[in-house]
Image: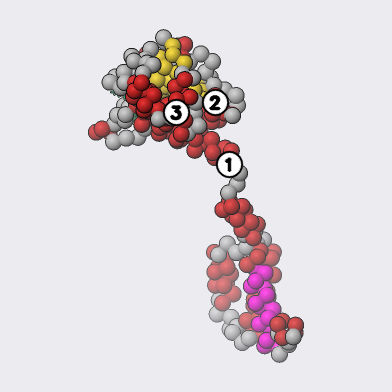
Amino acid sequence: MSLQNIRVVLVNTSHPGNIGGAARAMKNMGLSRLVLVDPVDFPSTEAVARASGATDVLDAVQVVATLEEALVGCSVVLGTSARDRRIPWPLLDPRESGVICIQQAEQGGEVALVFGREYAGLTNDELQRCHYHVHIPSDPQFSSLNLAAAVQVLAYEVRMAWLAAHEQPSKQEKLEATSLLNAQPVTADELEHYYGHLEQTLIEIGFLDPAKPRHLMPRLRRLYGRSGISKLEMNILRGILTETQKAVRGEPHKKRRQD
Ligand code: SAH
């Protein structure tokens, strides 16, 4: 399970409630590995209360003293920042981050999502240990999300990317695949046959006078050329022409013939 290769790292968190909130957000999205770097107040009953049932995530928490220790074994590290472009660095939005996390994890790589302090975020030194920076595109006038809320946004995007990589094709997708088959495009030679058949029929029903064609066929060619007609649709049109010809020639109608 690739989600197990993704760890959430909270650096120097002040409020234990945020640790519990982060654990809950993670468990909702199928993430289970929480690493705390030098938390101010942990273990804590407030963390347990805010985890609201995600106590297994809290029980399995790994507490370490430095970010370096938290990142051991990681091939990709994403550092989140409430401020856009604090230092010039490869910057991702949460959606791109989710995709990168899952791509790495699916290949067996270990990934870390790093979150900063409530009051001061991550230091420049910590941000420079990250391969990518992630900014949630919040309103620049009020850009800083609650820590657990930021964890929720990133965890959600990881889950969406994971679902996209794992989901069986939905009913809708299967339907679309079938209609794609039906929508096989008609080839130029098939279209030429159709134009011949159409012209012949239009003459037979008296709509086209070969002596005075008045650009009718080029105009119809332009119309059909624009329509992106499929093989299936072409068969229907050919069927209509055939039946029209039978009708003007007084030949038996398809249905009547079956009677
Ligand atoms: N005053 C701090 C805000 C820290 S908010 C600052 O200006 O950096 C606590 C943590 O939540 C941040 O370190 C980051 O990990 C995460 N966070 C909050 N808002 C975010 C946003 N808009 N984009 C990405 N991460 C965000």
Position of residue 106 measured from the top left corner of the image (x, y, whole percent)? 59, 29
Relative horizontal placement of residue 244, taking residue 46 as reference (left or right): right
Looking at the rendered structure, the kind of residue marked 3 is Ala
Provide the secondary structure element on which disc 2 rests. helix
Residue type highlighted by circle 2: Gln
Vertical placement of 199 versus 75: above or below?
A: below
Question: Rounded to the nearest whole Å, what is the CA distance between mark 3 and mark 1?
Answer: 25 Å
> Residue at point 52% right, 18% down?
74
Instruction: Identify whether 39 is placed above or below 207.
Output: above
- For this orientation, the residue located farthest to the bottom is 250
Q: How crowded is mark 3: few (under 14 residues within 10 Å), some or many (20 or more)?
A: many
Magenta-colored span: 234-249
Quadrant for residue 149, please give it: top left
Q: Which mark is residue 54?
A: 3
| Residue where numbered disc 2 is placed | 4
Please state, as top left, top right, bottom left or bottom right, where the N terminus lies in the image.
Answer: top right
User: Which callout, 3 or 1, points at the residue further toward the start of the chain?
Assistant: 3
